[in-house]
Image: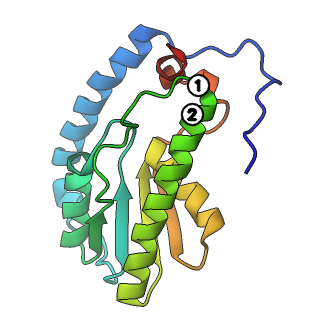
């Protein structure tokens, strides 16, 4: 698959550092609101037992989706981690091409896990991807519809990567 062209938006910039830092406070508030909503969440309909794989965001690992998996398992689904460690390259990519190569390799590894789960269960898998994990999930659903039942994305960016905070980290030497 050729690398996308982003030449149509020449002045796109990532968010300011202070806006990115403020996201941590928002996360704390949202976690607190989730705890307050626990009685309502317990009344949600039961799941059908199908497999759901959670895919963490950039720099996240299986622990970052543990609470979500626990909730899904309690609701009657079979929620599993992606099992591939931290969602980051072993060596920081120094160009968009290197990042895209890392993304391709990661998607192949996730695809192997998804195929394994499909063969074991005889059914397609739902993917829940958080941020970068959502990008992987959408790409895999397009490539392997025979394995993917549905995709749910959480805070997944959509558009030109230059408009994200992570783009500056990838581009630094």
Total numbered circles: 2
Residues 7 and 1: in front is 1
Q: CA distance from mark 1 to mark 2?
A: 5 Å
Q: On screen, 101 above or below 125?
A: above
Residue 169 in sight here:
yes
Residue 21 x/y as whole percent: 34, 16
Element at badge 2?
A: helix
Q: Is residue 4 left or right of residue 103?
A: right
Residues 112 and 40: in front is 112
Instruction: Please tell me which residue is depicted at 72% across the width and 40% down the height of the picture.
Output: 3
Residues 161 and 25: in front is 161
Q: Quadrant of residue 2?
A: top right
Q: On screen, 100 above or below 128?
A: above
Instruction: Please tell me which residue is depicted at 58% across the width and 65% down the height of the picture.
Output: 141
Element at badge 1?
A: loop
Q: Quadrant of residue 54?
A: bottom left
Residue 147 x/y as whole percent: 52, 77
What number is the disc on residue 98? 2
What number is the disc on residue 95? 1
Instruction: Please tell me which residue is depicted at 36% across the width and 70% down the height of the picture.
Output: 52
Name the outermost residue toward the bottom: 122
Residue 161 x/y as whole percent: 61, 29
Instruction: Please tell me which residue is depicted at 63% across the width and 33% down the height of the picture.
Output: 97
Is the residue under label 2 in contact with that under label 1 (CB below 8 Å)?
yes
Q: Residues within 10 Å of mark 2 (few under 14, many from 20)?
A: some
Q: On screen, 51 above or below 107?
A: below
Q: On screen, 24 above or below 80?
A: above
């Amino acid at each position: 698959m050729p690398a996308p062209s982003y030449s149509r938006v020449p002045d796109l910039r990532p968010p300011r550092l202070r806006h990115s830092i403020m996201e941590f406070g928002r996360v704390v508030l949202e976690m607190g609101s989730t705890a307050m909503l626990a009685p309502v969440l317990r009344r949600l309909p039961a799941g059908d037992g199908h497999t759901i794989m959670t895919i963490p965001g950039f720099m996240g690992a299986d622990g970052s989706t543990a609470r979500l998996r626990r909730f899904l398992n309690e609701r009657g689904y079979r929620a599993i981690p992606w099992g591939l460690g931290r969602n980051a390259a072993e060596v920081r990519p120094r160009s968009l091409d290197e990042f895209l190569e890392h993304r391709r390799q990661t998607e192949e590894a996730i695809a192997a896990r998804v195929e394994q789960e499909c063969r074991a269960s005889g059914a397609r898998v739902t993917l829940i991807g958080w941020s970068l994990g959502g990008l992987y999930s959408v790409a895999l659903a397009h490539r392997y519809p025979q394995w993917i039942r549905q995709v749910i994305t959480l805070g997944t960016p959509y558009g030109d990567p230059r408009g994200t905070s992570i783009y500056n980290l990838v581009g630094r030497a």
